[in-house]
Structure formats: C-alpha cells, structure tokens
Image (cartoon, rainbow, N blue to C red):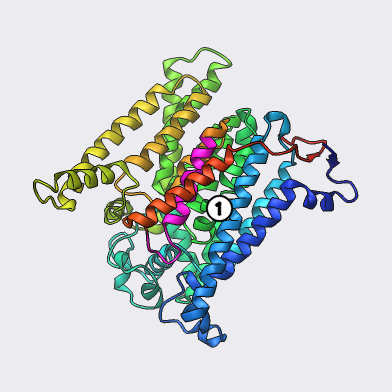
Amino acid sequence: MSTIELGTHGATARFRRSPVGRMVITGVIGSVLVAVGSFGVGDIPRNNAWLQNVGLSWVYYGHGKSLLNVVFWAGVVLLVLAWIRLGRLFFGDRGAGDRPAVPTRVLQWSALSWAAPLMVAVPVYSRDVYAYLAQGALLHHGFDPYADGPVHRPGPLLDSMAQVWATTTAPYGPLFMTLTRAVTALTGDHAIAGVLAMRIVMLPGLLLTLWAIPHLARHFGSSVPASLWLVAFNPMLLIHLVGGPHVELLMMGVLAAGLVLVLRGSHVSGVVVLALATAIKITAGVALPFVLWIWLAHLRERRAVRPVDVARVFAAIVGCSVVVFGVFTLMVGHGLGWLTGLGWADRIINWLTIPTLVAHVITVAAAPFTALHLLPVLSVTRTVGSVVLAVVLLVCWWRFRASERSAMLGMTLALLAVLLLEPSTLPWYYTWALVPASAFVLSRRVAAVIAGCCVLQLIVFQPDDSILLYEPVPVVICLAVAAVAGWSLIGRPRRPTTRLHTAGDVR
C-alpha cells in the first residue's frame, strides 16, 4: 500500500485517484444528478410560472418529466453506491488494518461537496419547507402560528404547501419560528427565494455537524471516518435534510455541538446550546436529562459527589434551559402554544412506528371475524405506545447513569425509542438517533442494518411525496434493494487500498 502525505505536491490528484477519492467524485456526480432530476420530480411551487418564464416548462410533464425521473434515480443510485463503497473502505474490507487513513478535513470537505448541489435542488420528498415559510409569514404578519393555521393567510406559500397541514398550527419551537419569521420578512411570498433562504439559514446545522461528529468520535475512541460516514455522507439524510429541506438539518448540528461542549466539560455552555436545539424542535429536549449524569460523572472524577451537588447540577440544567427557552418564547410573543401543534403529527399514518404497525396487524387479523376500522384501533395503540414510551424514557434515563459513555448510550436509545413508539415517524426523523449514535464504535453488521434501513427509507418514500408502504409488490422490491445494500457493506473483501496519511489526527 502506498502512502500519500496530504499537503505535499500532487496530493490532490493522488487523492482523486485513490479509492476514497473516486467514491467522493462518484457521490458528487450523483448529487448533481439528484439536483438536476429534482426539477422534474420534485415539489415545485404551485401556481408559479417560473419554469415557463425560463423556458423549462417541458421538464415537468411528458417525456421531459420521464427523463428527469431517470436522472434523479440515477443520481440516487450513484450516491448509494458511493456511500456503501466508502463504508466498506472506512470499516475495512480486510479488517482495521485495511482502513484508509483519510484526514478529517478532507472528509468534511468531501461531505460538503455531496451536499452542495442539493442546496439548489427543487424541494423533494416533502413540501414541509413551504409550510415553514407559511407559518413564518403568519408570525411576520401578526397572526399567531400556534393558534392559527396557514389557511388564515392565503397566497403562494399556502398554495405550495401540503394542504393537509393548511389548518394545523405550528409544532416548532420559538427559535425556529423566529428564524422563519426573519426569512419571510426578507423574501415575502416568493416561494423560490424563501426555499433558498431557508436552506441558507439551516446550513449552519450541517457545518456544526461536520465539526462536532469528529469530536464525539475521538472522545469515545471510535473511528472519525466511520462516524462521518454514518451521518454526513448518508444519502438518505443528505437528500431529505438538504434537498427537502427540513428543520432537522439545523437541529442536528446544534444538538451535536451541545453534546461536544458538555463532554468537554463546558457544561453550562453545552446546556445552553442544547436548550437552543430544543427551542428549534422539542425532540432535542430528550438529550437534556442525560446531561445530569455526564456532568456528575465529570464531578466524580475529581471528588465524591454529594446530594447538594446533584441538586445544584439539576438546578443549573433546568435554570439554563428555562432562561434560553423563555427568551425566545418572549421574542415570539405567543407563549407555549407550540405544545398544541405537536398533536397534529397524528395525521401521518405509516407502519414505520410500532403503534401504527400493531394497529394494522390487529385490523388485518380481525378481518375474517369482524370489520375493525383502523382509526379507533390506532387511537388505542398510540395511547398505549405513548405510555410505553414514557416508561422507556424513564428507564433509559435511570438505567444509564453510571458514566458519560452510558449516559450517551441511554440518550441514543431514548431517541430511538421516540422514533419507534411515537404516533408517527418520517425518514428525516432518524437524525435524532443517528447523531448521538455516531459517537460509538459500530460493528460492520450493525452498520449494514443501518445502511439497509436508510436505503429503504430513501426509496420507499418518493420524491413527489407519494409513498410505497401500502403497495405490496413495490414494498417487496424496496426491501430487497435495501437488503442488498446492507449485505454489500459486509460482503466479500476487496483488495487492499491506498492509504492517505497526514501528520495530524486521521482516525
């Protein structure tokens, strides 16, 4: 195996010729194709003639749409192939000794190169970004988005969003609503400018993620390339979060940065940042109780922990969180109304959560004997799921209190429990669990399961908002493709690879 010192003459060219470099370039090409294809299969603003005005109306119907559909999925295939191949390289085809040692900064820039083309894509897989803008416009024009749905202010933004949410209230925290108000104050009812501005506003989340994940990995002794592979190179997350875009793009970066600060011993600063993440989306608040155990573990390294220490740390966490959340709540000026918006997620029905899956099984099993309507059964299973979730969260918090490592594990499992037991889930929600999971050493088999699940989420949901979860033949095909993707990560070893070295940390 040859060694390349990055920073020397010709290193860039040699990196491009290396296995990692070739896969990075393949991923960039795939990302460009996804961005181009999105103009035919994505969610363009409704009642907007911009495609016609620039002479591109042909891309959204007939043969033009079919062509760009092929382009889009060709890009997805290239991204997935590059991601799986990078995973094989980072996890080592022949074991740990065969892992290419690529500098962290090269991987960070490579991940950004995959995300960059998606910044100008037409929104895909969801019209949520238009809902963000419509809710921000409500706030900007004096309405209460926690009490009034976007339907109260007709216009291009309302037209472009998914109409199922037209009468619902905003479920997002006061910080995110403050940001959406600022965006719509700048872009008005211009949907295209609003989408681009929202991506720019949420881009710091990706940058913070790229900064934080290597620190989390080093802190717990895991592989930086493998950790970045799990999140930053993940095609499912990149396409959904950047191409969507979705609020989780911003939330995951702030969450990851807060965890880094806490683990470094900057507890108050870390709690403040985690509170900011919670003020973006309440799900991030699941991480805050586990900070208590991390903070106490750090105290325990210096001296015995007394009950008064526990009380002070608890008070500091609660106090900082309340102050941060309170400041942005006052800025928005509509109190805690966002709590009422959380219940609207019940309108999403898919069998990716356990309560919904159980409801489907019950109705199908009872079909030979009696006709059970899904919604009443779903109401019961979701109620039971919420109770079970509350118990699981308490158990995770108490059971994983011994050390900072166990607290991080408990946090990861708690966020995973939210995904599996809440009333509904969507692909981009998986950032909640994948970000803290990136801190740990994963076996190739575990990584293969994650890869298969991510690929499934990328193809069973469609870029035009349709889903294949209730179409048996397409679901079987999607499951088979996902299984092949996962198996490919642990398949037969390849030949040894070129190694790239620097004087700095490349783990």
Quadrant in which the C terminus is drawn: top right
Q: From the viewer's perspective, tell me whether residue 443 is left or right of residue 286.
A: right
Give coordinates of residue 128: x percent, y percent: 41, 63
Q: Nearer the viewer, residue 357 or 125?
A: 357
Q: From the viewer's perspective, tell me whether residue 266 is left or right of residue 388.
A: right
Quadrant in which the N terminus is drawn: top right
Q: Give the magenta part as a residue range.
A: 446-467
| In the image, residue 460 lies in the stretch drawn in magenta | yes
Give coordinates of residue 155: x percent, y percent: 37, 78
How many numbered discs? 1
Give coordinates of residue 233: x percent, y percent: 60, 49
Q: Nearer the viewer, residue 81 or 438?
A: 81
What residue would you read off at disc 1?
235
What residue do we see at 48% from left, 77% from top?
A: 190
Find the residue positioned furthest to the left. Answer: 370
Depicted 345 relative to depicted 191: above or below:
above
Residue 186 visible somewhere in the drawing:
no
Q: Nearer the viewer, residue 189 or 19?
A: 19
What residue do we see at 49% from left, 76% from top?
A: 65
- Label 1 residue SS: helix
Find the residue positioned furthest to the right. Answer: 9
Dominant secondary structure, magenta: helix
Give coordinates of residue 222: x percent, y percent: 62, 31
- Disc 1 marks which amino acid? Pro
What residue do we see at 89% from left, 46% from top?
A: 8
What residue do we see at 45% from left, 46% from top?
A: 430
Residue 205 visible somewhere in the drawing:
yes
Within 10 Å of disc 1 (Cα), the crowding (few <14, some 14-19, many 20+) is many
| In the image, residue 172 lies in the stretch drawn in magenta | no
